[in-house]
Amino acid sequence: MEANPSVLATVGVGDLVLLDPLSEESLLSNLRERFLHKEIYTYIGNVVISVNPYRQLPIYSAEMVEQYCNGNFYAMKPHIYAIAEDAYSSLRDRNRDQCILITGESGAGKTEASKLVMSYVAAVCSKGADVTKVKEQLLQSNPVLEAFGNAKTIRNNNSSRFGKYMDVEFDFKGEPLGGLISNYLLEKSRVVWHVKNERNFHIFYQLLAGASDPLLKRLKLQRDCRHHGYLGDENPRLPGMDDATNFQAVQDAMRIIGFSEAEVMQLLEVTAVVLKLGDLQLSGQFQASGMDACGIQNIQVLRDICELIGLQESILEQALCSRTVEAKQEKVVTALSVAQGYFGRDALAKNIYSRLFDWLVTRINESIQVTAGERRKVMGVLDIYGFEIFQDNSFEQFIINYCNEKLQQIFILMTLKEEQEEYFREGIKWTPVTFFDNSIICDLIESGKGGILVLLDEECLRPGTVSAATFLAKLDQAFGSHEHYESRKSQSDRHITDTSLPSTCFRVHHYAGKVTYNATGFIEKNTDRLYRGLAQAMWQAKHTLLRSLFPDGDPKKASLKMPPTAGFQFKASINTLMKNLYSKNPNYIRCIKPNENQAPGQFTDELVRSQVRYLGLLENVRVRRAGYAYRQPYQPCLERYRLLSTHTWPRWTGTARYGALLSDLDIPPEELAYGHTKVFIRTPQTLFNLEERRRRRVEELATVIQKTYRGWRCRTQYQLMRKSQILISAWFRGHAQKKRYQHMKRAALLIQTYARGWKTRKEYKKYFRSGATARLACFIYRRLLQKFFLGLKNNLPPLTVSDRSWPPAPYRFLTNANQELKTIFYHWKCKKYRDQLSLEKRAAMQTKLCASELFKGKKTRYGPSVPEPFQGDYVGLQKNPKYQKLQAAARGKLVLADTVRKVNQANGKVRPCRLHTPIPELPGVLAVPAQDADGTWCLLPQQTGTGGAKGDVLLVSDHVIEVVTRVHQVLLETTQQALNLQIADQFSTQFKKSSIAVTVVQGPKGHLEPVCKKKGKKMEVLVC
């Protein structure tokens, strides 16, 4: 291992290469101690061991990502981010393809580990729009594949029931371009059967819990899981998992990846078909020949399935209840028994789901795969099932454990290869390491000349009756003497009695331990047979997706050749995977399950011990320690240990290689080796000795630093205190002298005052009594005036114009002065108020003021009219088109526009009229009644002095005050003469050639306007 201060300063030992003494017990104890202190990650060199905490820990935040980004693998505490950063930086900076192998048994946290690796790589990449889209698509593939490929098992609530290998492709800058997903051995038997207290695949429960009622109705499903045979009767709910929310997340993820709405709907329809197949019930029947047959018991379920896939009911019923065998261009239709019918139904459901899962992976690859082009960098992440040992192990466990044997083989070989390459680069002699080579077990399983898989394929293809017994006999014949194979017969030949091995089972000695496999079912599961009639029926369906899943159902492409077996396909895919992994630089994450209860804080020694054994952790540590347990580049070594030597401390000016030589530290020569770029230490004891000496040296240096700092601090404090004392003394003496001077000055002034007073009194003593009264009176008067003005200053009323309040005079002789001050203050307030007004408001105020001068105290109507604003335009000149000529004639000099009513000179009746009076023709005399109400009116004499031919005009207006005021202002502006205004209730007017006396009288209430009554040469005007 390289320099790792954080590993050395942590709970227990952060890197097991430094564990001393090294044994299974010490390794287990170290893992337990770190786990109980929430340190779930431990190193073996550059291998990360992850112990599942079964709870959320605050060690995956954005700050933690920032801390490990661009950091050294050995410079920080053990973390999964460290191996992700090491792999990503090697890919980006050194152009080396990487692969991250995540192994461990079910429930150990492999899926979560792969998510953390992908999320870290996504977080440290750049943030462009295209890059973000690719990262989102890569990350969102996880929830989709988990929904269709994960299930709840006894050991794990989210167990991956398939193997997944994802290649993420990057450009030369280290930005993700896309990826490619490969899947291995989906556990499709779970579709039709699962152990009690387990669940089927998540997607079934998510669909029933999260789909809307219209969608379930369209899919012919019921929300209650107990109505569907493949889901069982157990409670489907899982603690901490919301199926409805997860279903929505799956739909969102598919949209982000690029699935269309039609594709999502077809995917859900095929999923519903699988569920509905489990609801099909068969009933026994007899043919005319007496042979057993079967038929569909619940026709409605068959009808629902056919409606979903667009297939005739008779075609599907015939395919489920009969079998067509072709031989020599002849077809023979054979009726199936009930058991055979259920076998065919379950085989169809498994094949549909398995092919649907393959299509799903292919469809995701179409979205995330990069088009062919220039050479790209690749990082592979392998999340595959771990070693499995159950009470009853079948074909699936055999294949899974075979895969783990191959991964263990590549782990050991590549670990040794990496060690050997580093020693060769550094020029250090390589020490051969003895270790268990599991290639003998791999050959036992996969050997092309006669391995277990080859014999299984031969047995499946052999004509005649084949069974588990014939297969087991063939294995006994081929491997009876093999040291890693056992059966009842081989034990008998070796004179061994073992009742724990049934006669239908065989046992393989894997690297992780002995596993007993039940040979029953191996033949059927390896053949993975689907009746040709069922495949042809699915191909005839009108459902686009389902039809595409069964190309072998096309009669034109029909072949009598047996399809490849499941074991053959898996072996080929594993060999392809191994070639892929060998071409990349490996990084390992070994996941460990701490307890069977999935409970946080529990560490079961025996369970962890078994995993430590079959993961080969102890052998891995021994391989790492075979040569030198500790290695470090010269520069970091010099920085860490230079304080131990007098040659390099406190300053070294030479090269790092010579500065990092540890020969002068009394270390045995055989414990050290110097490579081209690194220094090697053989045993952990030497390293710990160096660390202990460094710790003591650091304490010594810390003491020196503390001593020096304390002396400096005391000297600094003393100098500061001395400077402060001098400053305080100087200020105190100055203050004392100032006080003494002020005291002397006050005394001198007092003496001077008394002396001048005495002198003055002595000089004017004879005149004192004669002028005392006047002087006292004058003083008192001035003091009272001063008090009055100061009090008035502090009690001025508000500046509101309407507020005319004023403080009263405190003394009678100040009454006139106080009244004058009140008038001045009010005028000043009014001026301030006027100065704040705009030009428009000033003009309006000026008009109101003019009206006040003309009518205040003379006309009854004036008081109520004061709050009413003068408008000027009462007829709407701008909006009324009939006044356009009038506006044109006025040429913008129109002063007031109002509707008036003219009094008839003959009978006194009032009628409306329009009177246009130019400015030069304004009257010189105007008579206005003193009392009027709403119907105000006025007398407008003619401009000529004689009265003219028609006499004076008597008009009635509702705005007499404004009219008169405007006339007065205009006349004053144009002629510089005031209007001759008469305000009286009795006046005389000239009608043609006679003079009429007009009298204004108060009429009864209720009149809306003035009423004129003419009697001879008199006219009465009644106003209300």
Image (spheres, helix red, strand yellow):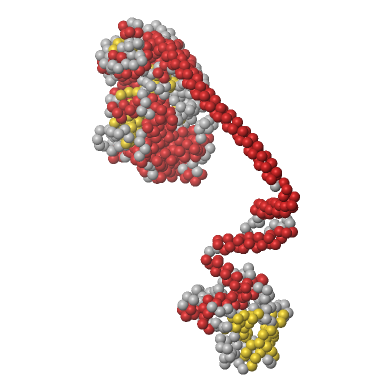
Front residue of 658 and 931 = 931
How many marks the image carries: the answer is: 0
| Residue visible at 69% across and 41% down in the picture | 758
In this rendering, would 82 be left or right of 755?
left
Q: Residue 508 placed where, x, y %?
A: 38, 15
Quarter of the image that includes the C terminus:
bottom right
Q: Is residue 592 above or below residue 815?
A: above
Percent from the top left, x then y, of residue 406?
A: 33, 20
Asked if residue 383 shows in the view, the reply is no
Q: Nearer the viewer, residue 725 or 174?
A: 725
Relative side of 62 to 532, left or right: right
In the image, 76 versus 362, the foreground residue is 76
Residue 794 location, x and y as percent?
Answer: 66, 52
- Residue at 46% across / 33% down in the picture? 202
Splitting the image into 4 quarters, where does residue 871 fall?
bottom right
Position of the N terminus by quadrant: top left
Asked if residue 270 is positioned above or below residue 863 in the image, the reply reads above
The residue that appears at 62% across and 90% down in the rendered structure is 991
Q: Position of residue 222 (x, y in %)?
A: 51, 40
Camera-nearest residue between 611 and 214: 611
Q: Residue at x 64, y 75 (%)?
A: 855
- The part of the image, by quadrant, that contains residue 953 is bottom right
Drawn side of residue 197 relative to residue 812, left or right: left
